[in-house]
Amino acid sequence: MVDPSKPQLDHASRQAFGSPNEIFDVLNRVRDSLATMFIAAGTNPSRTRPTATHLELDRSYIWPVTKIINSEDILSIAKDIPSLKRIDIICEACQQKGATEADADAVRDAVVRLERLVEVSAGDREAFGDLLQGLTYDDVTNRQEETRRMTYRGNSSLWGVRANVNFKTVIHSPSKIKSDWIDTIRLGGLVGLQRLRPIPWSLMRM
């Protein structure tokens, strides 16, 4: 259902709004505005425990923010950005310690824009995170490593067996017995094999 309280975007605008450049811009705005507000509140945004103590908030409110501010990969921070309700609590705590209303409003505006971007380009945070996996400004391997690790663990649990390495080597050579034949040697095996459940899987077949 269309929400009449929100500005509606035509197809061209939606394409531009969810473009990689827009995603980078919004994520940078979120990170920069949070860092500015924390500094204005007289705290070190790189340290979770002292910041939580200074702002008189539980660390569960602060560690995602310090993680966002200090992350080297801007595309990895989306999943850690708190909800608007938590952002309001953090902003109010920072204002009590010296941050200005403008500092807090900049944070709120950036997060609101992120939520709108998520809604338009992906639908929800989980799908938005999957979308970011496909974007890159350098080597995408590090960003996908955790996803691959989770996939490996999930598939291992599903099938009830896992191995560290599955190796295969195949060597072909013209046959010395018949000129129109090819001799083949196959070498293969599983290294670090573990059965997680007593399921009689056929692990190797020719």
Image (tube, grey):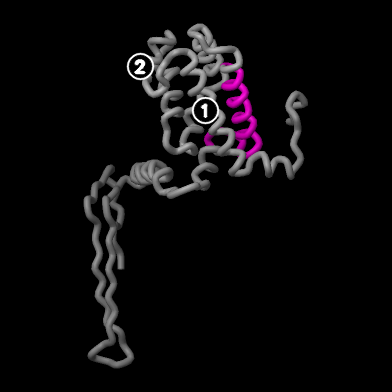
Look at the picture and state if 92 lies above or below 196.
above
The quarter of the picture where the N terminus appears is top right
Earlier in the chain: of badge 2 and badge 1, it is 1
Where residue 118 appears, as percent x and y from the top left, is 60, 34
Q: Which mark is residue 32?
A: 1
Look at the picture and state if 99 lies above or below 2.
above
As drawn, the residue found furthest toward the bottom would be 179
Where residue 169 appears, as percent x and y from the top left, is 27, 68
Q: Which mark is residue 10?
A: none
> Residue 46's image quarter?
top left
Q: What residue type is labelled 2?
A: Arg
The quarter of the picture where the C terminus appears is bottom left
Residue beneath disc 2:
49
Asked if the magenta segment contains residue 146, the reply would be no
**What residue appears at the point 63 percent right and 29 percent down from the top-left corner?**
113
Where residue 119 appears, as percent x and y from the top left, is 63, 33
Left or right position of 72 against 12: left
Left or right position of 142 against 86: left
Q: What residue type is labelled 1?
A: Asp
Mark 2, Cα crowd under 10 Å, few <14 / some 14-19 / many 20+, is some
Q: Give the range drawn in magenta.
A: 104-126
* Secondary-structure class at tag 2: helix
Where residue 51 appears, as percent x and y from the top left, is 40, 15
Mark 1, Cα crowd under 10 Å, few <14 / some 14-19 / many 20+, is some
Left or right position of 155 against 74: left
Identify which residue, 193 or 59, lies in the foreground.
Answer: 59
Q: Is residue 158 visible?
A: no
Instruction: Determine contact: label 2, label 1, CB under 8 Å.
Output: no
